């Protein structure tokens, strides 16, 4: 039996800055178009002068929010989520906390600090490089006084942030949580190292190079994003409900998944148990789905092993790009918006698919969503979502 809308934690507001632009609706419209956010961008190919496909966040934001794109995007996504939640009836409690999921912060400014400015900055500008500064200035802007901290678990950081927020709410430490996940780390140097690792594709159009759960996928297109959420048990009109989740670690290798999938499987099983739901209630596996052979094989195996035949799998990474530390947050936002809007805009088919792959626009009518994210280095995470309304 599906949980009631009064169960779980409401995802009450959503904000997004992605390769599609600055705003939640631009993300949704981009997905509906079926066209990838990535563009052919100079300097990101195999040679210094070559172009490559990346889904970078375009210029924008408020210069008053910081010198770098990272701080501007973080503040914009969080601000949009709060404004959205308030429009939907949310009133902040006395203790609002902030969780910021991040792996690499202000890479552009750090690069300039060493290579352009020779390590010489005014103290105020130097402090802007610190990962604590965007969280501090955000809390000042809104007068929030709950705990504020960064969490980091590679590509699983968004899920890790969601579960950290849930633990604060469950423990009564806060009344509400603003969760933001930010990764604007696309520099040519960073992208080339992922290409050398054999997991990222820059020399082929996104839908052809990155095709999760389809034959011939070569890996992922790299992307950027900052995504904000307001999480509260006191929301009357949430997009979706966070019911539970779990994390584990392979303790095996810095890049590869442990072949037996023992810890990944345990993470899935414990997430369902934590949420208090049965696997039979799951209808959608919103997969990590980077398009790499080992990840797609692992998630397909667990789909077939754990979930009912009517449960389908999808990944939006061919459209949004793999947004690294913000990846699972982007994908959680898509699932939450999908519950309210009755559809998920998944990538189109381009090759022979797994028989349970969901593609194009498909209807969402109840049922639970499992959002898995397998961060590089063995960071396994699973979050369970349900509809915001019965």
Image (tube, grey):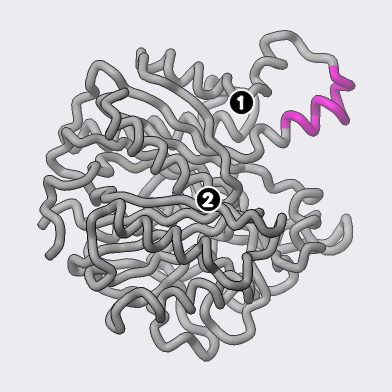
Q: Where is residue 325 in the image (x, y as percent from the top left)?
A: 57, 46
Query: How much space separates mark 2 and mark 1, taking CA atoms?
Result: 18 Å
Question: In this rendering, would 257 be left or right of 108?
Answer: left
- Name the residue that disc number 1 marks: 131
- State which tag comes first along the sequence, 2 or 1: 1
Residue 295 placement: quadrant: bottom right
Element under disc 1: loop
Any part of residue 8 in sight = yes
Give the extent of the magenta segment. Answer: 109-119
Q: Which residue lies furthest to the top in this view?
A: 123
Does 116 appear in magenta? yes
> Can you tell which mark lies on residue 169?
none
Identified at 76% across, 30% down, the residue is: 110
**Could one spot residue 319 in this view of the protein?**
no
Q: In which quarter of the image is the N terminus?
A: bottom left
Q: Which of 199 and 60 is in front in this view?
A: 199
Q: How busy is the neighbourhood of tag 1: few (under 14 within 10 Å), some, or many (20 plus)?
A: some
**Residue under pointer 2:** 156
Q: Which residue is drawn at 36% across and 18% down?
A: 146
Question: Image height check: is 276 above or below 214?
Answer: above
Q: In this view, does 272 lie above or below 94?
A: below
What residue lies at 21% left-to-right and 45% top-to-bottom? Answer: 8
The image shows residue 162 at horizontal and vertical percentages of: 40, 42
């Amino acid at each position: 039996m599906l949980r009631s809308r009064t169960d779980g934690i409401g995802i009450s507001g959503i904000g997004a800055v992605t390769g599609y632009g600055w705003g939640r609706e631009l993300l949704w419209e981009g997905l509906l178009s079926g066209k990838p956010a990535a563009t052919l961008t100079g300097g990101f190919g195999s040679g210094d002068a070559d172009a490559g496909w990346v889904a970078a966040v375009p210029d924008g934001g408020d210069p008053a929010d910081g010198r770098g794109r990272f701080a501007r995007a973080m503040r914009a996504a969080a601000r949009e989520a709060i404004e959205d939640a308030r429009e939907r009836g949310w009133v902040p409690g006395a203790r609002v906390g902030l969780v910021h999921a991040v792996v690499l912060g202000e890479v552009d400014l750090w690069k300039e600090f060493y290579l352009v400015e020779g390590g010489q900055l005014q103290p105020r500008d130097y402090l802007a490089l610190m990962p604590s500064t965007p969280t501090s200035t955000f809390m000042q802007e809104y007068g929030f006084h709950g705990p504020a901290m960064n969490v980091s678990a590679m590509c699983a950081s968004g899920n890790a942030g969601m579960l950290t927020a849930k633990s604060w709410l469950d423990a009564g430490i806060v009344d509400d949580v603003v969760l933001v996940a930010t990764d604007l780390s696309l520099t040519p140097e960073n992208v080339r190292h992922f290409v050398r690792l054999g997991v990222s594709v820059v020399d082929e159009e996104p839908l052809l190079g990155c095709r999760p759960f389809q034959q011939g996928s070569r890996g992922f297109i790299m992307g950027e994003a900052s995504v904000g959420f307001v999480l509260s048990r006191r929301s009357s009109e949430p997009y979706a409900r966070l019911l539970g989740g779990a994390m584990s670690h392979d303790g095996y290798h810095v890049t590869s998944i442990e072949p037996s999938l023992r810890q990944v499987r345990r993470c899935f099983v414990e997430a369902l148990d934590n949420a208090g739901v049965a696997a039979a209630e799951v209808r959608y596996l919103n997969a990590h789905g980077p398009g790499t052979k080992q990840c797609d094989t692992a998630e397909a195996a667990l789909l077939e092993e754990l979930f009912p035949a009517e449960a389908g799998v999808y990944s939006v990474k061919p459209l949004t790009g793999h947004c690294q530390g913000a990846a699972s947050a982007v994908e959680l936002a898509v699932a939450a918006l999908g519950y309210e809007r009755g559809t998920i805009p998944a990538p189109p088919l381009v090759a022979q698919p797994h028989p349970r792959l969901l593609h194009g626009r498909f209807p969402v009518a109840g049922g639970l969503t499992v959002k898995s994210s397998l961060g590089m280095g063995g960071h396994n995470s699973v979050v369970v979502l349900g509809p915001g309304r019965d």
